[in-house]
Amino acid sequence: MRGFALRPFLSMLRPLNLLILLLAQSLAAILLACGQGEWAGLNHGESVLHSPAHWDLYLLMLSTALIFAGGNIINDYCDREADHINKPGQNVVGNVISPRFAFASWLVLSMLGSGLGLWLGMRLGAAWAAWIPLLAALALWWYSTGAQHRFMIGNVVVAGLIFCAIMLPAWMGIWPFASANGELLTFASLAAGASWSREWIKDLQDREGDRLAGSGSAALRLSLAQNRIGIGLTLMAQMLLIPLAIWYWAWMSWGMLLWAAVILLGYALLIIKLFRSQQREDFGRLGTLAKLIMGMGLCWMGVLIWSRCGAA
């Protein structure tokens, strides 16, 4: 056993998941900037990436990346036994990466990320939002050490953290009082709901190992039929939010309507496959489809941004 190996360590950070989260956070900030006209002229090649507000965004994204990377490490640290069954050979903690090094890495990354977020929020005058990065780091630790195995608590924690990460550029005041705040709230709510559903599906996939770990998650406390109904209801609620947002925010461009139709079709396919899934592999494919739908949501957000900024 070695204390450190670069490639396994990087895989433990879940770089793709971090990239998706940071993309969502950056798109949120761009949407806010569009609401104030600060990103106008982007399509004309003007350099708009060096103002103080943009550097604040980069620092916020770095804080977010450090905190969630640390959260991924502590999750693998705490899930070593269950992952021997759920993901044999995939959890590198205790195999390639020593548990002591993994724990120290989580502590360092979490302290750096929460400290940077606290400093940034205080400097921007957002005293209450400045504490959110620290609370997020603590929530990820709480999630990994037990909350993920409690009935619905893990789902709430994950959904809440995704919601906060997307709203932080507004709450920190990087681009305050933007007209797009309400629209951003819609996208953050969709992302939180999608994260809730995907976490629930992942729990169904990991039932065998979680049962041995003494988990009390909904995936284990409810029957398969009840789990399907519960997940299906969360997916249908997200589907309902899409036409409501189109109507309320008057997203009537062809691009917005087309992407909305694609996302709704993705949700419909996910629900159909949900009620046909039986085996662990089936739920693994469902989780992949759920992540793909989240990616579609980011594209939808990008289309809205282009309609606001690209035509400026």
Image (spheres, rainbow, N blue to C red):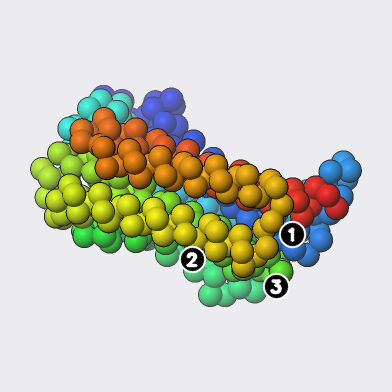
Of labels 1 and 2, earlier in sequence is: 1
* Count of residue discs: 3
Q: CA distance from mark 1 to mark 2?
A: 22 Å
Disc 1, SS: helix
Which image quarter: residue 104?
top left
Which image quarter: residue 1?
top left
The residue singled out by tag 3 in the image is 177
Q: Where residue 53 sits in the image (x, y, percent)?
A: 74, 59
Q: CA distance from mark 1 to mark 3?
A: 10 Å
The residue singled out by tag 2 in the image is 132
Camera-side mark, 2 or 3? 3
Q: CA distance from mark 2 to mark 3?
A: 19 Å
Tell me which amino acid carries mark 3. Phe
The residue singled out by tag 1 in the image is 33
Front one among 243 and 166: 243
Circle 1 residues within 10 Å: few <14, some 14–19, many ≥20? many
Q: Is residue 252 above or below residue 255?
A: below
For the point 26% across and 30% down, which residue is it? 281
Front one among 213 and 272: 272
Disc 3, SS: loop
Circle 3 residues within 10 Å: few <14, some 14–19, many ≥20? few
Tell me which amino acid carries mark 2. Ile
**In the image, 281: left or right of 289?**
left
Tell me which amino acid carries mark 1. Ala
Front one among 100 and 113: 113
